[in-house]
Image (cartoon, rainbow, N blue to C red):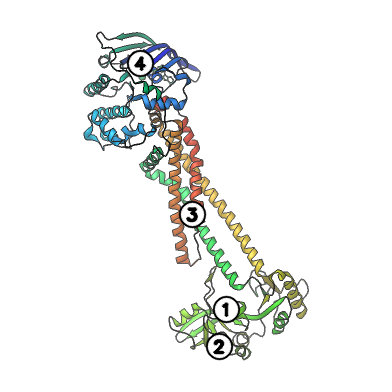
Amino acid sequence: MKPVLELRDVYRTYRIGESTVQALRGVSLTVEAGEFIAIMGPSGSGKSSLLQILGLLDNPDKGEFYILGHDVNTLSDDEQAGLRNNVAGFVFQQFHLLKRMSIVDNVRLPHIYSGLSGNFTEEAKKRLALVGLENRIGHTPNQLSGGEQQRVAIARALIRDPLIIFADEPTGNLDTKNSLEIMKILQELNEKGKTIIMVTHEPEIATFANRVITMRDGQIVSDERKDGASSPVAGYKESDIDSLGGRTGSLWKDRRFIGFTVQAFQAILANKMRSFLSMLGILVGVASVIAMLALGEGAKKAMQEQLKSMGSNMLAIMAGSSMFHGAAQGSGAVARFTYNDVDNIAKITPLIKNAVGGVSGSVRLVHENRNWSSNMGGVGYEYGTMRAALPSVGRWFTREEIQARAKVAIVGVTVVRELFGSTNPIGRTIKINRINFTIIGIAPAKGFSGPRDEDDMVMVPVTTAMYRVLGKDYLSTIYAEVSNPASMQQAKSAIDALIRKNHHLKADDESFNIRDMTEIQQMLTSTTQTMSMLLGAIAAISLVVGGIGIMNIMLVSVTERTREIGLRKSLGARKSDIMLQFLVESVSMTISGGIIGILIGIGMSLLLSYFAGWAVQTSIYSILLASVFSVMTGLFFGLWPARKAAELKPVEALRYE
Ligand code: ADP
Ligand code: MG
């Protein structure tokens, strides 16, 4: 049978800046199955260096090394990690237990890297019973004495039933009584067939071993087998050799991923305040983007609805110069439209299908003891069908009423609510600027257009409005319906020419303007595009800032947990395992921030719509976008810290203070 371990002329040199330390200088050693070896020697003689090389935590600079007959120099990092998991168990002077996990979870830990699936809690409990800790299950390491902690570490070293146990000064931090108990446990394990290699500088401890190797200045100076020491009892099965370093399970099947996720949340929860503060950037970014997208969508939808009700083939000819400042606000002269203009425009065949004139103004409405300020629109007969204003309750004006300046009114639902509460207003009388009107209908509800309440208005015949209420003898607006939306531009220039001719205006006179709904629509689209781009920039900036926060905290976390990483590697974690663990952790953090951000964002938009009355609409699309972006941020900004962690060397990481 091949020896378990075989070193031939091994060298190990450490480099610290300019100077070098030769820790091992030509060490040759053969370890048979079932031996209990104590490595002794003064401090600095290279004992730990030798043990680390034997345990695959470090590699020699020069020399040959065979483990169960396999040349270690030809094994990849992952294969070595697999070997540490399958055939080696480590016990360290500092115990190296993970403080935030229960001792059962600590003992189970090597299994997460084994590629095996199953419930290992029971096995962990059995190992704890083996070292006499069956009454301490459920405790965390902090609740145990040093001797008990070291026993947990031994239980952890045993969980994978390893061939060899490596122990570096296992009793170095313990008093005599605890030291002897630990040694008894190790001795029993050896009697049951485990190969044990232990570093110690105490002669009493070394007496437990049946072979003592003494080192000085990086070389073996003596190697004695105890008299009468029984030759090794146990060997290993040939199948052990085949399974060297192999890991067959997949990330999902062996539930490694679930294990990493659970551990990630344990780590996040272990530093609640810190994790929350690091999530804050992502959280604020996501929340504001969700809220603003909801507002933008709401505004867009409201405007589109308004446009739809207005009709896409509608032209508005308004007095005043400025395109988007409403009528009668431009500087200089204001065109005064007449019925003649309306008739002329309606007769531009075949370009124009219909035309109607109107006036508007602010009025005071009174009903019994209630009064209310509102907007009045004086409208022509065709207005009802052209602008979708036909009452849902009651009726539209007749042509005769419009001719005869009749005192009849159609009111919006806001006016009904303010003046009549829940009673039916049809047939009742209200005063508009002190003149009595009879209500004949309620206008269809239109809702808000931005901050303006479209239902806060009253309509009367245009003649009544001009001559009885406002005392004007001209119209302020003419609406024209174009027969074919494709000839919108032709219609516009025809109307423009007509008005200029009727009113003797020069070509550059700006006392009126013609609004085209497609133009408004285009402006809306470009406004929404600008807004989306702004939002995108805000989102990008906040996610980058949030991501940098996450990266920063992950780097701190990697540094803080360097020894944990070293421990995990000694238990058989591969580079990819460490990498994945930290990536899962950063993504868990950004996702949590993202989810809280989404909830706050939705809450904010609901509040805005409730208290400020703004139209909002949260889309699934924006939620999806936010989620995807928070995951990407976690991946992107977690990558570097995770790589940094994965690249750490097991020995150096374990040594880190
Ligand atoms: P022992 O365990 O016998 O006390 P070590 O094997 O830890 O000795 O160290 C042997 C020598 O190598 C010592 O001089 C020590 O300072 C040096 N040494 C060990 N590890 C490192 C390291 N990572 N970097 C530099 N020097 C090291
Ligand atoms: Mg040492």
Q: Does ligand 1 reach within 8 Å of label 4's beta carbon? A: yes
The amino acid sitting under disc 4 is Ser
Q: Is mark 2 on a helix, strand or loop?
A: strand
Which is nearer the N-term, disc 4 or disc 3? 4
Does the beta carbon at disc 3 come under 8 Å from ligand 1? no
| Residue tagged 1 | 389
In the rendered image, residue 311, in percent from the top left (x then y), is placed at 62, 72
Question: In what element is the residue under mark 3?
Answer: helix
> Mark 1: which secondary structure?
loop
Rounded to the nearest angstrom, the CA distance separating label 3 from label 2 is 50 Å
Q: Nearer the viewer, residue 349 or 215?
A: 349
Q: Which residue matches tag 4?
A: 43
The crowd level at tag 4 (other Cα within 10 Å; few <14, some 14-19, many 20+) is few
**Residue at label 2?**
408
| Whether residue 321 can be seen here | no
Q: Mark 3 points at which residue?
A: 623
How far is mark 2 from mark 4, CA to CA? 109 Å
